[in-house]
Amino acid sequence: MFHGACFCGALHYEASGAPTHRGNCHCSMCRGTTGAPFVAWFTVPRAGFRYTQGKATRFHSSARVTRGFCPHCGTQLTFEEEGGADDIDVTVCSLDDPERLPPRKHICASSKRSWVKLADGLPEYRDGGDGG
């Protein structure tokens, strides 16, 4: 079981199930919705994720993608693809203990900013990547 919250503490969640697809995403939408050069995500079964306090604001960042944010502080917590697998992506750094789920890859590396220099030795995938 994993627990996390938004920055201000208005939203709390728990996630269960084996985390998969642990990666840093460099796509323009992740950068745009966070203001960061990339975002660390992990994936769990949608049925294993629930808010234990508060209710997220949902934003359709594209025709098939919905992101969950705190309505008070703006922290992005989730990414859900409609019509895709029955899972949900959760921001690693919203976890109470993000050290438990370090990234295993970089995805959408073709969109990486030129000034981001990666030296962590993790595999880089031009698009979504494969595996966990």
Image: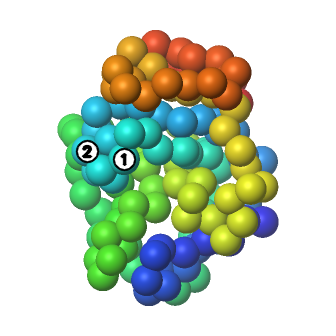
User: Horizontally, is 72 left or right of 116 in the view?
Assistant: left
At a point 65% along the width and 49% down the height, the residue shown is 44
Q: Where in the figure is residue 92, as x and y percent of width and height?
A: 59, 54
- Report which residue position mark 1 lands on: 36
Vertical relation: 116 (above or below) 63:
above
Mark 2 nearby-residue class (10 Å; few <14, some 14–19, many ≥20): few
Q: Quadrant of residue 52?
A: bottom right
Q: Amino acid at mark 2?
A: Gly
- Mark 1 is surrounded, within 10 Å at the Cα level, by few (under 14), some (14 to 19) or many (20 or more) other residues, namely few
The quadrant in which residue 100 appears is bottom right
Spatial distance from mark 2 to mark 1, Cα to Cα? 7 Å
Q: At label 1, which amino acid type do we have?
A: Ala
In the rendered view, would you say 33 is above or below 81?
below
Q: Position of residue 63 (x, y in %)?
A: 21, 38
Q: Which mark is residue 32?
A: 2
Q: From what the image shows, is residue 132 above or below residue 45?
A: above
In the rendered image, residue 66, in percent from the top left (x then y), is placed at: 32, 50
Q: Position of residue 19 (x, y in %)?
A: 72, 46
For numbered disc 2, what is the local secondary structure?
A: helix
Please indicate, yes or no, whether residue 65 appears anywhere in the rendered image: no
For mark 1, give the secondary structure. Answer: loop
Mark toward the viewer: 2 or 1: 1
